[in-house]
Amino acid sequence: MLGSHVPELRAPELLVEVARSGSLSAAAELLGITQQAASSRIRTMESLIGAPLLVRTRRGSALTPTGDLVVQWAARVLEEAAQLDAGIAALRSDRRGHLRIAASLTIAEHLLPGWLVAVRADQVRAGHEPTDFTMTATNSERVVALVTAGEVDLGFVEGPDAPTGLHHRPVGRDELVVVVAKDHEWALRSRRRVAAGTLAATPLVVREAGSGTRTVLERALTGLPVAAPVLELSSTAAVRAAVAAGAGPAVIGAHAVRDDPATGRLVAISVTGLDLTRRLNAVWRDGAQPPSGPARARSARRAEPPGTLTRPVRRGCRCLLGC
């Protein structure tokens, strides 16, 4: 255990620079501090040691015999500290070079891949080493668990609320839509619209418990008599296939069925009296700011205000949060 007389390393670093330059002001300028701050550091160290370390001369500042001895000891310590600093910098660089991400299925399947490609392209254009990404696609509940356990660095979730116990930042909004097969009775009406109560009373094809889509739907239907699901599936692709096969209506993220109405595979149905908007949030465990590296780095050029995750990353912005 270190004793109470060991000074903070910035002070002996300053003393070593004074020994090299022969001037307290020159050493302060080299270290990027004011002369007042430099004098304060020296006085603090003299108080700890119990003896003067510098004397003023016409040519600047000179070490006392005690100061000279301290410099000899400090030089070895500072050399080891520099190696420690270099090692930590290498670890931080390794972390910047690899980012582990977990994302809820809608974000992972329809939004994040293009975003990551755009981030890497921006890094290459800026002359930076491209980041290696690994992405886990799962439901929002599992994303939160992975981030909480430290198994991933950054998560993206969807739902009515940001998860508790984690730092978060909104990155956009998304909307759920009701879809049916093209020969479903709702699709054959002149006005493709149903009331919220009708939707609640209809057996639906739904995602598994814990998914952001399921959570938003259940929250939106609170207070209404809700029919039991006709099917419960673990992926958006499976839900779409079941709806197209005639299993029943489903409520899915708009991005997941963006092309289906145009191809005629599925038909979108509007719902009156129901808010199916959901928030998209980035989540991380430690620190008020996102993990260092591409999740936090910003370009020198000022970016626009945060937008939605549905748009690709803006040119000139290398931030995974759309800063």
Image: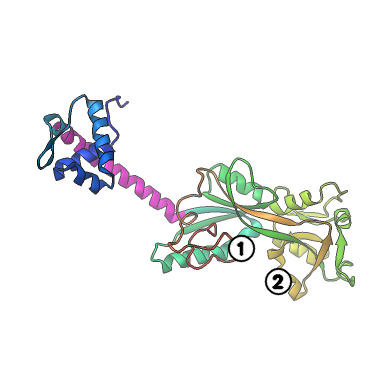
Query: Callout 1: 10 Å neighbours few (<14), some, many (20+)?
Result: some
Please provide the residue range marked out in magenta.
69-98
The amino acid pointed to by label 2 is: Asp
Quadrant (top left, top right, bottom left, bottom right) of the N terminus: top left
Q: Give the side of residue 41 with respect to residue 285, left or right.
A: left
The image shows residue 172, relative to residue 42, as above or below, that is: below
The image shows residue 212, relative to residue 312, as above or below, that is: above
Residue 77, by quadrant, is: top left
Element assignment for label 1: loop
Task: Identify the residue position indicated by label 2 in the image.
Answer: 259
Task: Identify the residue position indicated by label 1 in the image.
Answer: 111
Q: Position of residue 176 (x, y in %)?
A: 74, 60
Q: Position of residue 104 (x, y in %)?
A: 63, 54
Q: Nearer the viewer, residue 34 or 287?
A: 34
Q: Give the side of residue 93 with respect to residue 271, left or right.
A: left
Q: Give the side of residue 22 with respect to residue 144, left or right.
A: left
> Is residue 79 magenta-colored?
yes
Residue appearing at x 31%, y 47% in the figure: 86
**Would residue 24 be seen by someone viewing this image from the given angle?**
yes
Element assignment for label 2: loop
The amino acid pointed to by label 1 is: Leu
Residue appearing at x 63%, y 47% in the figure: 142
